[in-house]
Image (cartoon, rainbow, N blue to C red):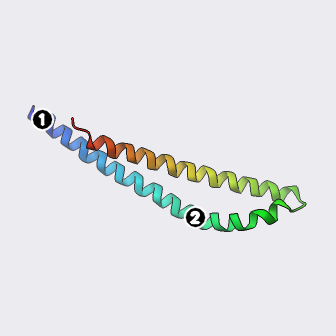
Amino acid sequence: MDIFSKVSKSRKVLYRIIAALLILLSIAIGIYLIPSLMPLIKRTPYQLLHPEVRVRNELGLDWFWQYVGWFIAYMIFRIGKSFYKDSKKPS
């Protein structure tokens, strides 16, 4: 029984470390994405009205990759939060 409690304690510590690292990673991804989001928002109305298709296509790709980045950051944050909740559960 003593070995089980040590393993359980180690698992909880490991889950908390993984949770902290994942949450910090998601915050870092969000901070990395914010500087490119503001200019993207500002230039969107002008590029939507631009007559060249290439410009509108590049705008669509920029928005797509911005969405993918935020989705990845969100999922990493949720996974980190799940690890933290698992570390709080009694074993």
Question: Does residue 8 appear to the left or right of 64 in the view shown?
Answer: left
Q: Position of residue 51 (x, y in %)?
A: 90, 60
What crowding class fits label 2: few (fewer than 14 Cα within 10 Å), some (14-19), or many (20 or more)?
few
Amino acid marked by disc 2 = Ile
Question: Does residue 21 appear to the left or right of 73 in the view shown?
Answer: left
Question: Does residue 67 appear to the left or right of 15 in the view shown?
Answer: right
User: From the viewer's perspective, is residue 17 above or below residue 38?
Assistant: above
Q: Say which element carries label 2.
A: helix
Q: CA distance from mark 2 to mark 1?
A: 47 Å
User: From the viewer's perspective, is residue 36 above or below residue 3?
Assistant: below
What's the mark number on residue 34?
Answer: 2
What's the mark number on residue 40?
Answer: none
Amino acid marked by disc 1 = Ile
Residue visible at 41% across and 54% down in the picture: 23
Residue visible at 44% across and 56% down in the picture: 25
Residue visible at 52% across and 59% down in the picture: 30
Q: Position of residue 1 (x, y in %)?
A: 10, 31
Residue assigned mark 1? 3
Residue placed farthest to the left in the image? 2
> 21 and 43: which one is in front?
43
Q: Say which element carries label 1.
A: helix
